[in-house]
Image: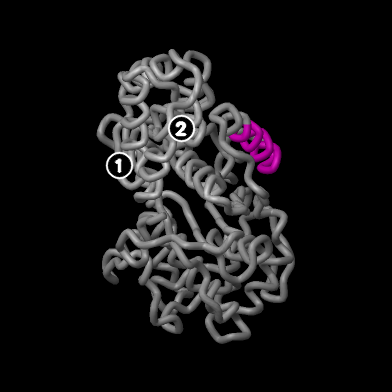
Amino acid sequence: MRLYDTARQAVVPFEPDEHVLMYTCGITPYDATHVGHASTFIAYDVLQRRLIDLGHQVKCVRNVTDVDDPLFARARALGVHYLDLAAGEEARFNRDMEALNALPVASAPRASSAIPDIRGFIGMVLDRGFAYEAGGSVYFDVTRFPSFGSISHYSHDQMIALARDRGGDVDDPHKRHPLDFVLWHPSLPDEPSWDTMWGPGRPGWHIECSALALRELGSTIDLHGGGTDLIFPHHECERAQSEAATGEPFVKHWMHVAMVYMNGHKMSKSLGNLVFVDALRKDWDPRAIRLAIIEHHYRREWEWDDTLMHRATARLQAWGVIAGSAPGVLDDVRASLDDDLDTPSALALIDAAAAAGHGVNDAAALLGVVL
């Protein structure tokens, strides 16, 4: 199998041991699952299916970020407790993933479950000289980590702009460097707070995933995933603090899924250009929703439009005409998936086999579509 590695900027062999350790950044549970979310998690689901097909045992951890600014803001606006909101939206997400036939993950730990781990992790980073206390917060010192930026390969100015746009607070007067990032900071009056030796407060965004990955999978993992919007600052910061804490390589392979667009803009709650999976499920077969997603290569941005579900439904019907499995089709689909998870080519191969009157059950099942 060959997969694109974001840090190496190339399609390279992915050759893990029998046991594959995967970590994918999950949801912040403050609203329903939209197609952009589903696109990310279905890509990793197809990857897991092929790895299992190759004989690997896969341990995939997908966190739930239930300690984060958007969740608190949404709970505040609705007048509900943030954990109640998180529980409801996490349950809705799980129903959507089950309907789309996503394999169960090994664990889906909540950030709120990891406060003791986070406190210990921050202590490790401080003890190794990569962090400092200022203004009631603890910050990671990026100047102590010379390879900061080696996942994204962005320039200093690009990193500043993205940090400013994505909650990095580059103008914080307590920071020594504008790209320094928060490990722990004081909570607002209506936010949860935990006691530490640095003062009461709550964890920063990035530290949650590092602590959970270390707790659930160990210091080095085979593959880390998420959307391309997480490359910077989230994954860049995650790698820096993880390697600062343990002194060991954090991730062997970085895999990112491109964004989904609608009306010319990335699907986002702020713009309201969203298509929710639970709404689609009311009118369409979930298998067709899955096909509409994997029609697109995971590394290419794509636009949602009204024709997708009709096309996917027609494809599903064509595949199901003849039962059974034609020889050779499954191996051809396997080869496509081993070529940087080329699901569009895999679909085209199955289309051709079905059109020629062959059964395609096994090949479809490898993509998570049960006929």
Report whether residue 269 is seen: no
Q: Which picture quadrant has residue 355? A: top left
Magenta residues span: 81-94
Amino acid under disc 1: Glu
Kindly report the secondary structure that dominates the magenta region of the rendered protein.
helix
Q: Earlier in the sequence, mark 1 or mark 2?
A: 1
Let me know if residue 238 is in the magenta part: no
Which percent across, then down, holds residue 111? Answer: 65, 54
Which percent across, then down, holds residue 297? Answer: 33, 41
| Residue 363: assigned label | 2
Which percent across, then down, holds residue 103? Answer: 60, 39
Q: Nearer the viewer, mark 1 or mark 2?
A: 2
Colour approach in the figure: one colour
Left or right relative to 302: residue 23: right
- Secondary structure beneath label 1: loop
Distance Cα–Cα, label 1 vs label 2: 25 Å
Amino acid under disc 2: Ala
Residue at (52%, 20%) from the top-left corner?
Answer: 281
Residue at (43%, 31%) from the top-left corner?
Answer: 327
Q: Which picture quadrant has residue 13? A: bottom left
Q: How many marks?
A: 2
Q: Which residue is mark 1?
A: 301
- Secondary structure beneath label 2: helix
Q: Residue furthest front?
A: 327
Is 125 in front, or is 314?
Answer: 314
Is 68 in front, or is 144?
Answer: 144
Left or right relative to 145: residue 69: right
